[in-house]
Structures are given as structure tokens and as C-alpha cells.
Image: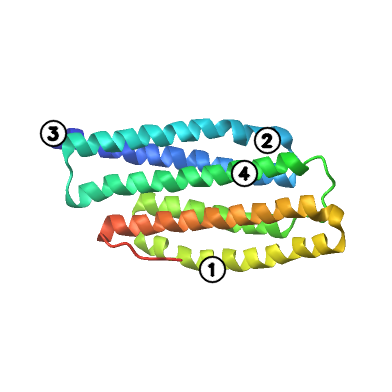
């Protein structure tokens, strides 16, 4: 009975992590959409929804602590719990960056953009793929999928360097562009950080299976 109850607790932990991941994916998608479409309502929805994600992180942390205290798991069972703890921390940080993007939207949504947004949405699409890949690798315990995320991260890093340079050019051309261009720089940085956290999740997926922590960046 004890083992059956323990396995049920682990299943619930798995489900809770995925539920939180789904909310974070939605927040990132909505944050970028709000920026592209000058949508202040959607941006505010992302900001308001962050409390729910924060609450989920606390609830999952508490569940993990309870499992460790009451079940005293060892070996792979312990790694399952520790991986859950680490992943929700990465997810919570992703959600924070989604909020930061939404706040950037609110700062400039009523301005005409200095240029059509092409590179940032393109970068965001790859980042969203990475987040999905990381969660899929966790769901399926797919180590091969987890290991491929480093290639995507390299692409995002290269795009970040490219996206970073263009707003600087607009700033130098006209000081009136500084406020808006700086917001685009911040957004690109937030996306790059989300990609890093997606990579972290894949590293924890590999740790869950192997017990070894490898650097995929």
C-alpha cells in the first residue's frame, strides 16, 4: 500500500509540473502576441496570470518537501522529486520573463514601432519550440530529444546577437528611438533567457535518467 500511495504521489507531481508548463507556454505565447499586436489587454492578462503560476510553484515545492519527508525516497525515486523541484523553478523564471515582455508591451504599445517586428517574433518562435521540446522530453523521458535542444539554443544565441545590433543602430540614428529600441533589446534578452531555462529543463531530464548533470549550453 505504501508503494502504491508513493507512486500515486509521483504521478500527481508529474501532472502538476506539466500543468504548470502548459500555463507558462501560454504566457510566453500571449506575451509575444501582445507585443506584436500592440495588445495591452493581452499583456495585462499575462501579468495578472503570473500569480497563479507563482502559487503553483509554491504548491509543488510543498508537495515535493512532503514526499521527501514522509517517503524518504532514494535513487531514481529521489531524482524524480528533485527533478520536479528544479523544473518548476525554471518554469517560474520563464513565466517571470513572459511578464517582463508583457510589461515592455505596455510601455510602448501606444507608439508606432520604429520598424516592423520580424526578428523578435522569429526568435520567439524558436524559443517556444524549445519550451515545448523540453516539456515533451520530460513527458516522454526522451533523452535523445533532450540532447538536441543545445542546437536550438545555439540558433537563439546567434539570433540574439543579430537582434541586439539593429535597435542600437536606431538609437544612434535618432535619440528619440532610444526608449522603444531599448524595450526591444530587453525583450530579446528575455527570450534568450527563456531559451536557457528550457535548456536547463532538458539537462534535468537527462539527470533524472542517468543521475549525471551535463551542460547542454
- Secondary-structure class at tag 1: helix
Q: Residue at x 27, y 57 (%)?
A: 209
Closer to the chain start, of discs 4 and 2, is 2
Q: Which residue is mark 1?
A: 154
Q: Looking at the picture, how far across and down is residue 84, in whole percent?
A: 34, 45
Q: Residues within 10 Å of mark 2 (few under 14, many from 20)?
A: many
Closer to the chain start, of discs 1 and 4, is 4
Mark 3 or 1: in front is: 1
Closer to the chain start, of discs 2 and 1, is 2
Residue 42: which disc? 2
- Secondary-structure class at tag 3: helix
Instruction: Look at the picture and state if 151 lies above or below 97.
Output: below
Q: Which residue is mark 4?
A: 100
Please say whether residue 50 is visible from this viewpoint: yes
Q: Looking at the picture, how far across and down is residue 190, in whole percent?
A: 60, 52
Q: Residue at x 79, y 65 (%)?
A: 169
Asked if the residue at tag 3 contacts the one at tag 4, i.e. Cβ–Cβ closer than 8 Å, the answer is no
Mark 4 or 2: in front is: 4
Amino acid at each position: 500500500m505504501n508503494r502504491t500511495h508513493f507512486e500515486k504521489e509521483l504521478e500527481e507531481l508529474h501532472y502538476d509540473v506539466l500543468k504548470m508548463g502548459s500555463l507558462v507556454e501560454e504566457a510566453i505565447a500571449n506575451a509575444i502576441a501582445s507585443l506584436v499586436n500592440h495588445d495591452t489587454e493581452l499583456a495585462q492578462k499575462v501579468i495578472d496570470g503570473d500569480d497563479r503560476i507563482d502559487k503553483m510553484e509554491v504548491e509543488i515545492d510543498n508537495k515535493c518537501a512532503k514526499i521527501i519527508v514522509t517517503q524518504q525516497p532514494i535513487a531514481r525515486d529521489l531524482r524524480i522529486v528533485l527533478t520536479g523541484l528544479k523544473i518548476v523553478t525554471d518554469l517560474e523564471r520563464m513565466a517571470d520573463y513572459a511578464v517582463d515582455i508583457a510589461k515592455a508591451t505596455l510601455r510602448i504599445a501606444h507608439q508606432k514601432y520604429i520598424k516592423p517586428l520580424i526578428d523578435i517574433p522569429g526568435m520567439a518562435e524558436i524559443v517556444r519550440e524549445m519550451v515545448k521540446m523540453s516539456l515533451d522530453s520530460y513527458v516522454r523521458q526522451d533523452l535523445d530529444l533532450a540532447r538536441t535542444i543545445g542546437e536550438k539554443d545555439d540558433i537563439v544565441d546567434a539570433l540574439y546577437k543579430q537582434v541586439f545590433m539593429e535597435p542600437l543602430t536606431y538609437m544612434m540614428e535618432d535619440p528619440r528611438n532610444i526608449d522603444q529600441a531599448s524595450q526591444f533589446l530587453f525583450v530579446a534578452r528575455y527570450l534568450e533567457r527563456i531559451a536557457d531555462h528550457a535548456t536547463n529543463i532538458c539537462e534535468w531530464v537527462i539527470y533524472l535518467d542517468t543521475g549525471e548533470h551535463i551542460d547542454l549550453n
